[in-house]
Image (cartoon, rainbow, N blue to C red):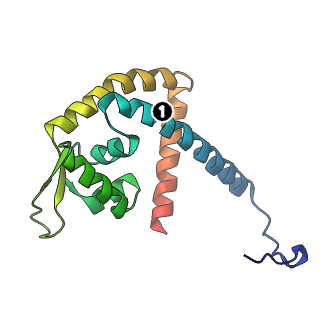
Amino acid sequence: MTVPAREDWPTPAKQSEGGALLTDIALATFRLNARLMEAAQDLAAHGGLTAAWWQVLGGVLDEPRSVADVGRIMGVTRQGVQRIADLLVERGLAEYRPNPAHRRAKLLACTEAGYWAIRQISVAQHPWSSELSKAVDLDDLRTTLDTMRALITKLEEG
């Protein structure tokens, strides 16, 4: 990559206070995500899963869904979900079922073995999250969740 001389670099517009705060939130979110993924990896091991497997199974705990739907819910690519779904099926933690709405896009469903693995994780995860939540006021946690959902909605609108 060829980098132009500094005097040819574009000048960014002045950032608003909200824009600067949102930038700081994004950077903090990246750091938080890294710590949460480390914790998720450790917690998932309690059920014999990886964090990614746990994430995909989490998308079908309440009802069978297509791989594309799981990807949308979890915010990951359909291809990534497909690769993990195939591994989960191979290991008996999930199964494919016919999809009455689409002949080729089968539904991914959790099996009893998958539910058992998730239960094993929950035994460790519930005390972990309860303890961690004590570090922040409950109203602040609610506000954080509402804010994150609002930002997700806005970003997904395009």
- What residue is pinned by disc 1? 39
- Residue at the image position 54 percent from the left and 43 percent from the top: 33
Of residues 75 and 57, which is closer to you in this image? 57
Image-based side of 25 in relation to 83, left or right: right
Q: Position of residue 117 (x, y in %)?
A: 25, 33
Mark 1, secondary structure of its residue? helix
| Residue type marked 1 | Ala
- Residue at the image position 29 percent from the left and 62 percent from the top: 68
- Residue at the image position 48 percent from the left and 36 percent from the top: 142
Location of residue 4 (image quadrant):
bottom right
Image-based side of 16 in relation to 142, left or right: right
Seen in the picture, residue 15 relative to 89 is either above or below; the reply is below
Seen in the picture, residue 2 relative to 76 is either above or below; the reply is below
Of residues 79 and 100, which is closer to you in this image? 79
Q: Position of residue 82 (x, y in %)?
A: 29, 59
Of residues 17 and 53, which is closer to you in this image? 53
Seen in the picture, residue 11 relative to 156 is either above or below; the reply is below
Image-based side of 131 in relation to 106, left or right: right
- Residue at the image position 48 percent from the left and 44 percent from the top: 146
Seen in the picture, residue 79 relative to 141 is either above or below; the reply is below
